[in-house]
Image: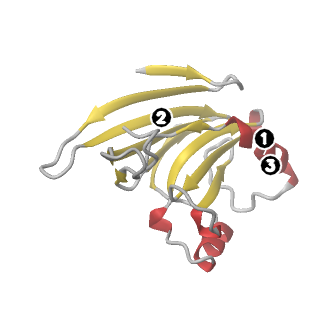
Amino acid sequence: MIVIKNGMGVLLFCSVAVTATAAEKFETRTRNMVCGDAQFKIESTCARSREEMTLNTCRAQVLTIVSNGKTVRKTLPELSEANVKSHKEAGGTLSDLYVTQWGCAGRGNASVALLYYSVGGGNAASSESMAFYDSAGNLIQKDRTPRYAKAIADGMDKLAPVPSIMPTEGP
């Protein structure tokens, strides 16, 4: 297990588990983060690309959130209703989004976990999205409120990589 401490004092942990199939070698990598009162764990199961400029092949990521003695597992992507709507209106497909970066911003009950989703490149409106979770681990539906705006803005430049589709951050 590897422990990383980012500039905000947030501890990030990772571990590796290897699985294999006849066609491709998939590897599961995890990242852990504590944000507010919640513990977050993201699992990415991917087969590494054989070419430097080709995206890794990944299965759907799984997010586990532990808060107040309750554990919730979610298959990603999970976006607010507004972000789902805007992503689809821009012509995007939700299943193409993978968390490639994440972080925690704010303090106490104003803490916000930020998950940055990407399709792996491009500049179309549907090539990226964000999801935000409160200090108890709940998806924030209305992320443009004053309570979270500063934490979200402050956290954008403090994101850590999550291994997934990006060849430089993959398994």
Q: Is residue 86 above or below residue 51?
A: below
Q: Position of residue 44 (x, y in %)?
A: 40, 45
| Residue 11 at x, y percent in the picture | 59, 24
Taking the spot 62% from the left edge, 59% from the top edge, the residue there is: 129
Q: Are marks 2 and 3 in contact (CB under 8 Å)?
A: no
State how far apart marks 1 and 3 are (Cα): 7 Å
Q: Secondary structure at mark 2?
A: strand
Q: Which callout, 2 or 1, points at the residue further toward the start of the chain?
A: 2
Q: Quadrant of the N terminus?
A: top left
Tell me which corner region of the image, top left, top right, bottom left or bottom right, holds residue 75.
Answer: bottom left
- Spatial CA distance of label 2 from label 3 is 24 Å
Kindly identify which numbered label has been placed on residue 31.
2
The x and y percentages for residue 153 are: 80, 46
Residue 156 horizontal side relative to residue 40, left or right: right
Residue at 54% x, 59% y: name it: 78
Camera-side mark, 2 or 3: 2
Dot 1 or dot 3, earlier in sequence: 1
Dot 1, how many residues are within 10 Å of its Cα: few (below 14), some (14-19), or many (20+)? Answer: some
User: Residue at image x 59%, y 35%?
Assistant: 160
Dot 1 amino acid type = Ala
Residue occupied by mark 1: 110
Is residue 111 at all visible to an observer of this figure?
no
Label 2, residues with CA under 10 Å away: few <14, some 14-19, many ≥20: many
From the image, tell me which residue sits under label 3. 148
Marks 1,3: beta carbons within 8 A = yes
Quote the CA–CA distance across marks 2 and 1. Answer: 22 Å
